[in-house]
Image: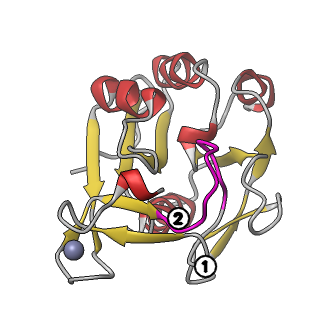
Amino acid sequence: MFPAYTPSAGWIEVICGSMFSGKTQELIRRLRLAMIAKQKVQVFNSSLDTRYGASHLISHDKVKIPCQAVKRSKEILRLIKNDTQVVGIDEVNFFDPGIVEVCQKLAYSGKRVVVAGLDQDYRGKPFAVTAKLLALAEYVTKNLAICMICGAPANHSQRLSNSKARIDVGAADKYEARCRKCFKPEKS
Ligand code: ZN
């Protein structure tokens, strides 16, 4: 499914889905395979994601790889090295709209760009950044979680807190994976 790296052609892969659908695990898996093959990998996440500290990408099951935390998408272009072959970006939905153009530039320059992020916010509305990247990507993976109420495939992130902010970083303490039937956006 994912062709071997060739210097001439880059591409974009998007891993999307709800909370608890294993997006970061899948991102880490792909990046580790590239590292095992001795490809040059750079990994970024948003400095908004303060869950585990800035210096590592860590999945909920505690697998971790080094990463650089950035505030603005443009910083990625400044930090990227010429000989980097694979670029990983986690929580892409946290970034400003410029991240779409940044991913395109990286892919056009011959790099494999692998991004992971939420496709919907806690009201079930698409994140524009993720939606655009889904349209532009060569490869799309949509992960589903399991509904914590009924066990059906879960496509939604139910916010348990009363926060009205679109971005409210947290994990099991603040969110639940829910299916279409059990998801109650109006209660958030
Ligand atoms: Zn359900």
Residue 119 in percent (x, y) is at 38, 44
Is 135 rendered above or below residue 56? above
Is 13 rendered above or below residue 22? above
Q: Earlier in the sequence, mark 2 or mark 1?
A: 2
Q: How far apart are labels 2 and 1 at the CA level? A: 8 Å
For the point 41% across and 46% down, the residue is: 123
| Magenta residues (range) | 159-169
Asked whether 152 or 184 is in front, the reply is: 184
Q: Which residue is mark 2?
A: 28
Determine the image quadrant of residue 67: bottom right
The reply to whether dot 2 and dot 1 touch (C-beta < 8 Å) is yes
Q: Which residue is mark 1?
A: 63
Q: Judging from the image, what secondary structure is the residue with disc 2 in? A: helix
Q: Judging from the image, what secondary structure is the residue with disc 1 in? A: loop
Please give left or right for residue 145 compared with residue 164 in the image: left
Is 125 rendered above or below residue 33? above
Mark 1 neighbour class, 10 Å CA radius: few under 14, some 14 to 19, many 20 or more: few
Asked whether 115 or 175 is in front, the reply is: 175
Q: Would residue 33 be counted in the magenta stretch?
A: no
For the point 54% across and 39% down, the residue is: 93
Residue 172 in percent (x, y) is at 56, 78
Asked whether 77 or 130 is in front, the reply is: 130
Residue 158 in percent (x, y) is at 42, 63
Asked whether 102 or 108 is in front, the reply is: 102
- The image quadrant where one finds ligand 1 is bottom left
For the point 61% across and 77% down, the residue is: 173
User: Disc number at residue 95?
Assistant: none
Q: Which of the colour schemes (rainbow, by chain, secondary structure, one colour) is used?
A: secondary structure
Mark 2 neighbour class, 10 Å CA radius: few under 14, some 14 to 19, many 20 or more: many
Which amino acid, mark 2?
Answer: Ile
Residue 90 in percent (x, y) is at 58, 50
Q: Most extreme residue toward the front, as rendered? A: 187
